[in-house]
Amino acid sequence: MPNPEHLRFLKRGVERWNAWRDQHEKITPDLIGADLTSTNLRGANLLRAELRSAELRGADLRKAHFFEAELAWADLREADLAGAALPGADLRGADLRGANLHGADLRGANFTEADLRGANLIEANLRGTNLHGANLTRADFRRAYLRESNLVDTNLIGADVSQIYLFSTVFGNTTLTDAQGLATCNHGGPSILDYHTIVKSWPLPVAFLRGCGLPDALIDYLPSLLNQPFQFYSCFISYASKDHAFAECLHADLQNKGVRCWFAPEDMKIGDRLRPRIDGPVKRKL
């Protein structure tokens, strides 16, 4: 049960609540199990607040401050947390289905076994965030920052991960089946990608595997290791200068599909004799 006095102050409005917090900085707000369904708490100071098992479904929490707040098992379905600050917050087992976390600061937050199906995490900062066992089916991660995030046992089926930033991100027994935009991820450095993730999520784009640090020699043998036949497809791309943009797109698409390509501007130097420079590299690629 929440502290009646604390709950009464909060329901008087954000302006009065924030003023009260400023005057009582050492008090930890006790709002455990509080029913705050659809409440307007935009910009509220909820630093280190105890909100375990609180009912916050549909609440307006835009730009609210939840630094190190306790939100384990809270009901945050369809809550609007756009631009909210939750560094170090505990959201273990929280229900965030359909929640809006666009641009939220989630650094170091704990989302262990949280339900984030269909959540909006566009441009969210998830550096060092613990998502162990979280359900992120169909979540929207476009342009999110996931450096050093823990995605062990995480379900990302059908999630949109277009242009996310990865570096030292841990993919362990992670399900990436039907995840969109894997080939567009921005890799600041290698990440950890284990065998279980590859098996559960196969096929994975070559660009993603390379970005995570897998060597080409291993990538070439993955189909065999996964009991799939080798596909020795290859091609040589030659083109007129006016078609350069199209040729680059074609080269990138073929590479991502695992087709070995010999690309004239990449593999030839000015002054090279055409026939010898083509024959040698093409034979090595075949």
Image (cartoon, grey):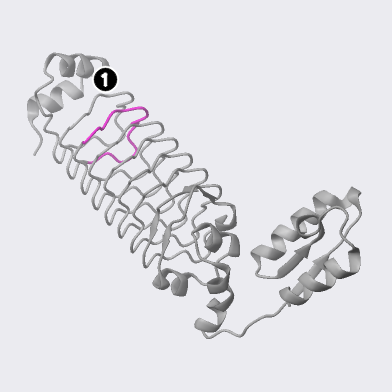
Was residue 56 drawn as part of the magenta stretch in this picture? yes
Q: Position of residue 204 (x, y in %)?
A: 55, 67
Q: Describe residue 130's horizontal placement relative to residue 126 as left or right.
A: left
Stretch of the chain drawn in magenta: 55-68
Q: Residue at x 73, y 75 (%)?
A: 284
Q: Position of residue 22 (x, y in %)?
A: 18, 15
The quadrant of the rendering that contains the C terminus is bottom right
Q: Looking at the picture, tell me which residue is in the foreground, 154 or 207.
A: 207
Q: Describe residue 238's horizontal placement relative to residue 93 as left or right.
A: right
Is the stretch drawn in magenta largely helix, strand or loop? loop
Q: Looking at the picture, tell me which residue is in the foreground, 212 or 118.
A: 212
Q: Looking at the picture, tell me which residue is in the foreground, 269 or 43.
A: 269
Q: Position of residue 251 (x, y in %)?
A: 74, 60
- Report the amino acid beneath label 1: Val
Q: Describe residue 1's horizontal placement relative to residue 53 as left or right.
A: left
Q: Which residue is mark 1?
A: 14
Judge whether 10 appears above or below 265 on screen: above
Judge whether 37 appears above or below 237 on screen: above
User: Picture quarter containing residue 100?
Assistant: top left
**Element under disc 1:** helix
Q: How many marks?
A: 1
